[in-house]
Image: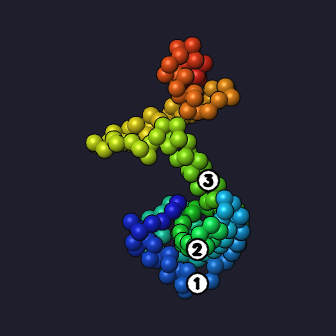
Amino acid sequence: MGVKENQPDLIDDIRDSFKMLEPEEFTQHLDFVHGKIETRKCSVIPDLSLIEKPTLWKSLSTIIRIESERYIKSTGNTQTETRYYISSLYEGAYLIQKAIHSHWDIENNLHWSLDVSFNEDGSRKRAGNSAFNFSVINRLALNLLKKEESKISIKAKRLLAGWTPEYISKVPNF
């Protein structure tokens, strides 16, 4: 689970742990993708002695730090980011880093699909829970359209589903 600034005591304890304790495991991965060179370093500490209230987190067994550095070839700029995580599993730094990276790939691909097919970023829904509710409906619709086996884009499937009663009958339902 990612730890952010909204958990100030926990994130401070984790930062202190990485200052004071030596990580038990460390791995580094280099990626060359989309005009970027990215280095990700994963450090894992199973020693929870500096975490003030570890029992608040069920089965907590490790704290994790991911340090990313991205060099963007087109601009020559370098971006750095440090993220912290807690986990009930200890599978080693390589597998933990791979799992975290895979999770973000899935999230990014989902967001991209929702924005391209449903224009979620351009949505003007703001009242009450309307943005959340429509997002849930869009995710449901996206999943159903992905199950339909035609070899056309999700955006085209969405249009066909709205315009063609014959096509909507091909889209699997719950």
Q: Which mark is residue 159?
A: none
Q: Which mark is residue 78?
A: 2
Q: Tag 3, which secondary structure?
A: helix
Give the residue type at disc 1.
Answer: Leu
- Residue of label 1: 21
Percent from the top left, x then y, of residue 117? 52, 37
According to the image, what is the colour scheme of the structure? rainbow
Residue farthest top in this picture: 166
Residue lying at 39% horizontally and 72% vertically, measured from the top left: 8
Nearer mark to the viewer, of 3 and 1: 3
Question: CB of mark 3 within 8 Å of CB of mark 1?
Answer: no
Q: Looking at this view, is 147 or 46 the one in front?
A: 147
Q: Looking at this view, is 168 or 123 the one in front?
A: 123
Nearer mark to the viewer, of 2 and 1: 2
Residue lying at 62% horizontally and 66% vertically, measured from the top left: 74
Rendered image quadrant of residue 26: bottom right
Q: Considering only vertical position in the picture, is 169 above or below 3? A: above
Q: Few, some or many C-alpha atoms within 10 Å of disc 1 (few <14, some 14-19, many ≥20)? A: some
Percent from the top left, x then y, of residue 108? 56, 51
Percent from the top left, x then y, of residue 174? 54, 25
Percent from the top left, x then y, of residue 62? 59, 69
Give the residue type at disc 2.
Answer: Thr
Q: Tag 1, which secondary structure?
A: loop
Q: Considering only vertical position in the picture, is 163 above or below 96? A: above
- Residue of label 3: 105
Residue lying at 39% horizontally and 66% vertically, measured from the top left: 6
Left or right: 76 as drawn, with respect to 159: right
N-term-proximal mark, 3 vs 1: 1
